[in-house]
Amino acid sequence: MSQTIRWGILGTGAIAHKFAEAMGFVPDGEIVAVGSRAQHTADAFGDEFSVPRRHASYPALVEDPEVDAIYVSSPHPMHHDNTLLCLNADKAVLCEKPFALNAREAESMIQCARDRGLFLMEAMWTRYLPAIAQVRRWLAEDAIGEVRNMMADFGFRANFNPEGRLLNPVLGGGALLDIGVYIVSLASMVYRAQPVQVAALADIGTTGVDEQTTMAFRYGSGAMASLACAVRTDTPRDVRILGTRGSIHVPAPFYDAQIATLNAGGEDPVTVQPDRVENGFKYEIEEAGRCLREGLLESPALPLDETLAIMRTLDAVRAEIGLKYPMEA
Ligand SMILES: NC(=O)c1ccc[n+]([C@@H]2O[C@H](COP(=O)([O-])OP(=O)(O)OC[C@H]3O[C@@H](n4cnc5c(N)ncnc54)[C@H](OP(=O)(O)O)[C@@H]3O)[C@@H](O)[C@H]2O)c1
């Protein structure tokens, strides 16, 4: 793999724009190509971000010999097919969250990458933020003792648009898959395990997807997690991790964390505010680039087996709330 990773972007929606902006902060990465379902949208994106190679289809993008790795930024029901398209053309893939619609799809994506010896990573950008990396270090150092509980929420009030990605079942709408995945992934990072017992309640709205979901997880050790997500309700969006000797607080917005505070039994609180750039996608892009240059096939900070385990937990929550997508019938 060359020193500078040559990226292609699959899909030209909202989050592809944020990814392209972040590339400006990544010294050893560049966007050389974009693929869209139409020439005019590929050209518009190419003009906006000075991307030289513009493809009018995803198959044309994946066949581009100038591209090392592809960022899949289509809606989640398309992640499976779009990722397989890239892998089968021998391209490494960074795939947006949620990694897939369900664990069955995730398993097939991971199997394909392993069979072909290609890099694959879930774009769970929060995990790579400097403040969250500090939280991981505190947990690894046992700074708060055994973790017994955590509370996390992620909710915002989106406009009611039944056709849009957030509420449309055909586009994988609903709070759980769109933003619940952040808090389920965070719980997985904190406990380095999946729950042995999952309880959940949801408000299924008129479009047939969850407008809000509240989850309670119990782990093998007896530890618990209380998690809530919503796409029609604003919530505080912070995280508290409670241990036997202290606690960690990541204030809002935890998913784009700027700071984290450690309260370790009886000592003065320690707040860290690592240097970081405004666009937090920089850190996941750098991690993908580092892995590619070092010949790793997955990111040690979020291995593919964990991505798959998180998808299984999301499936378990969906079974609890009775949410099935039309394409899963
Ligand atoms: N990491 C984050 O912070 C973050 C934030 C928001 C969303 N996301 C994730 O990123 C993915 C895309 O979200 P987004 O907000 O960017 O969505 P979006 O604005 O609707 O864009 C999605 C893009 O996917 C392509 N696409 C392919 N098939 C499509 C279809 N049948 N219908 C609509 N678009 C289709 C389109 O690109 P072309 O027209 O160019 O083909 C479209 O512009 C989702 O999985 C979402 O969960 C991540």
Image: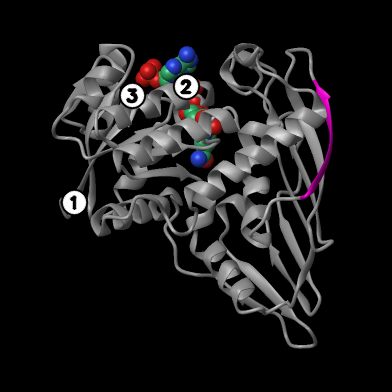
| Of the image marks 3 and 1, the number of the one nearer the N terminus | 1
Magenta region: which residues? 196-204
Residue 187 pos. (x, y %): 68, 54
Q: Say few, some or many: other residues with alpha carbon within 10 Å of mark 1 (under 14 / 14 to 19 / 20 or more).
A: some
| Of the image marks 2 and 3, the number of the one nearer the N terminus | 2
Q: Secondary structure at mark 2?
A: helix
In the image, residue 58 sits, relative to residue 302, either above or below, namely above
Left or right side of 52 for 270: right
Pick the residue in front: 21 or 167.
167
Q: Secondary structure at mark 3?
A: helix
Disc 3 marks which amino acid?
Leu
Q: State whether residue 180 appears in this view.
A: no
Are the residues tagged 3 and 1 within 8 Å (C-beta)?
A: no
As for residue 32 lying within the magenta part, the answer is no
Residue 130 pos. (x, y %): 49, 64
Any atom of ligand 1 within 8 Å of the CB at mark 2? yes
Distance from disc 3 to disc 1, alpha carbons, whole Å, reads 23 Å
The residue sitting at 63% across, 72% down in the picture is 139
Looking at the rendered structure, which numbered label has been put on residue 85? 3
Name the residue that disc number 2 marks.
78
Looking at the rendered structure, which numbered label has been put on residue 4? 1
| Of the image marks 2 and 1, the number of the one nearer the N terminus | 1
Disc 1 marks which amino acid?
Thr
Are the residues tagged 2 and 1 within 8 Å (C-beta)?
A: no
Distance from disc 2 to disc 1, alpha carbons, whole Å, reads 28 Å
Q: State whether residue 213 appears in this view.
A: yes
Q: Say few, some or many: other residues with alpha carbon within 10 Å of mark 2 (under 14 / 14 to 19 / 20 or more).
A: some
